[in-house]
Image (cartoon, rainbow, N blue to C red):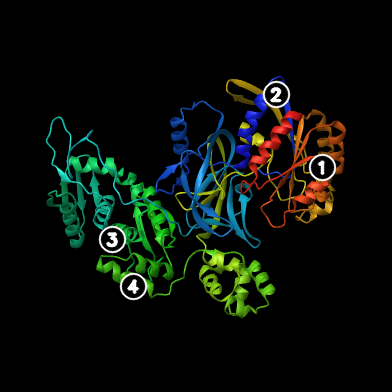
Amino acid sequence: MVIKIIANFVRRIFSGMFKGKKELSLGFYGPPNAGKCVTPNTEVVLFNGEIKKIKDIFDEITSKKNLPHNFKEVFIDVSDENLIVPSFDINNFQIIPKKVSHVYSQKYKGKIIKIKTKSGREIKATPNHPLIRLFNKGAEFIRCGDLKVGECIGITKKVELRSGLNIPQVTNLNFNINGQIIQAKSKFHNPFSMNLPTYIDENLVSFIAYVLTESYHERKRIMFSNSNQFLLSHFQFLVKKLFNLNTIFRINKGVPQIEINSITLSRWLEESLGMKPSTSAYKEIPSILMGLPDNLVSILLRRLFDCEGYVPKTYKERGAEIEFSSKSKRMVEQVQILLNRFGIVGKFKEKIINNEAYWRLLIGGSDNHRIFREKIGFEIKEKSERLNNLCSAKLKRNRFYLPIVSLLDNVRKKSGLTQKEFFLDDKHVARMKKDNRITHHRISEMAKKIKNQFIRNLANSDALWDEITEIKVQNYNDYVYDLTVEDTHTFLLSNGMIAHNTTLANKICKDWTGEEIGKVSKIPHETRQVQFKEKVDIEFKGKKLTFKIVDTPGIATKIDYEDFMKFKMNKKDAQKRAKEATQGVVDAIKWLDDMNAVIVVLDATKNPYSQVNITIIGNLVARKIPVLIVANKVDLRKADMRKVEAAFPEYDVVGISAKKGKNMEEFYESVFKLAKKA
């Protein structure tokens, strides 16, 4: 996120400061951290209940701001748009509303990583796009390109959206309005008038659920079909109660139907609720219903499952799961988001029937079933009885687990507790350690008895951890997109995956050209050659600046082949890597002749002397190249700015938190000063 803000700022600075220079070379020394993007059809959840493709969000912004569409790359400030998304905070594992500050798009040609999880969730993103992984060192952001099959990534367990109870009012453009009675305008007909609901209540929520599930909805009529007498009677009652409209009852091929002939109703549903007439594959829950209070969400889900839900006759049936199915993938994902309100998480599964795709949401585990019964339930007696059977079956609690048994065991040892005291029994600990799996249910029980904040965060987490089952690499040549979210830097996808956005990086080339110079790696000195991008063009207010970005290897004080052997390399390969890394540092020194300015990025939590190659710093001094020292991670307790300043008394030092966006104004000032010196 922050690097794109930096890039935007530096565009302005350099376009003004270097009008006379043909090309400026800007060098970056320090730990790499690249940008990231997702593909156009990635669907993002907004806090007001809307679900939009990330491309549509971007297009709406460019259209509103009257920006050109023929671009290679563009980064737009949307802080004035009040665009709010639910966002996961990795520090306390809670999902909270946060503001989007920027939207971003670029033309990208390269590899795309497609990741699929055990619960049927998928994402397509560039290799540098991070997701959240839980492993034996805790929770961390990790590049898609570094993830492996079998690892667990974050998905939503609990999320609460917010929308009001008031219904947007229609205007006299398309309706004749007489108080609370409206009539659709028509040149050739005299449509029936109807009463106008003024707010969302239990009756309107129920009616909409029936139209979404068991109704044929077109421009002039709505036809509800079902064999259950309660549902038929209730639908007929609601039509009269809400709209004062008459209905027609008929039997069609043995199936009872209730028909409403009203262009006024269909037009009102579309204009006030955004509920367009559509076939079953394109139906979706109106966004205004996605953020209702719990009691109305419960009723909405009950009606949806009364119509399209299935409960097995006995718990011995294969799967023994509550199922919701539809031809509309969007609506199935919306149902899961609504279930997240109560902490219920299912798995997605596609089913092909007569060459047509249907989408299923499967809710397994007696814990989930009991929550469903308590918070939602069924109106249909037969389904309610079957649900009771599932709840008493003591089925496997869920498919999700936490792969952190070694981490927890270290916590146990530090606390001085026995295995039985910590894990609450000692019968299953050996198996848990072997499989590296512990259930959420056990974590919740442990949190009640053990005073440890990390365990409490896990127990009260708004996320679950979903195992990766498939990773595919695909070629790609199209636009990719990103959002910048304040503070927490994450946003939610419609299928529940938690995505991360960009933080501070030395890959400005990625943000200005859409091409990465290199990649992040945990192996020390992995970037073994100087990499650069020639002729990076920036246009600003009709002026063009051409410059070169140079990305160098790390600036560690020493390079030892034994460092590589720690990453399971044999001695021969480790020695080869060390030689290549040494040559990289030599090349980095040579490239100093071609640089006008240098930014050195350090970790403020570590000893600055262990991060800096004195030879490189000496060459910077000898060449009189302007240098800015950036101390990152100053938001952490271990950060020590005084040590960094003491190590570099002759240079300007600025402390920032790339992750939290802290001290960015000071960073801007420092970049401005650096530009003047170059």
Along the polypeptide, which appears first: circle 1 or circle 2?
2
Q: Nearer the viewer, mark 2 or mark 4?
A: 2
Instruction: List the residue tagged with mark 4.
Output: 388
Distance, label 4 to label 3, CA atoms, is 15 Å
Along the polypeptide, which appears first: circle 1 or circle 4?
4
What amino acid type should be assigned to the residue bearing mark 4? Answer: Asn
Q: Is residue 24 left or right of residue 326?
A: right
Distance, label 3 to label 2, CA atoms, is 67 Å
Local secondary structure at mark 2: loop
Q: Is residue 547 above or below residue 212?
A: above
Along the polypeptide, which appears first: circle 3 or circle 2?
2
- Position of the N terminus by quadrant: top right
Distance, label 2 to label 4, CA atoms, is 74 Å
Counting from the top left corner in percent of width and height, residue 479 is at 53, 34
What amino acid type should be assigned to the residue bearing mark 2? Answer: Phe
Q: Nearer the viewer, mark 1 or mark 2?
A: 2
Q: Residues within 10 Å of mark 1 (few under 14, many from 20)?
A: some
Distance, label 1 to label 2, CA atoms, is 35 Å
Distance, label 3 to label 1, CA atoms, is 65 Å
Q: Is residue 371 left or right of residue 536?
A: left
Specify the label residue 580 is tagged with: 1
Instruction: List the residue tagged with mark 2.
Output: 18
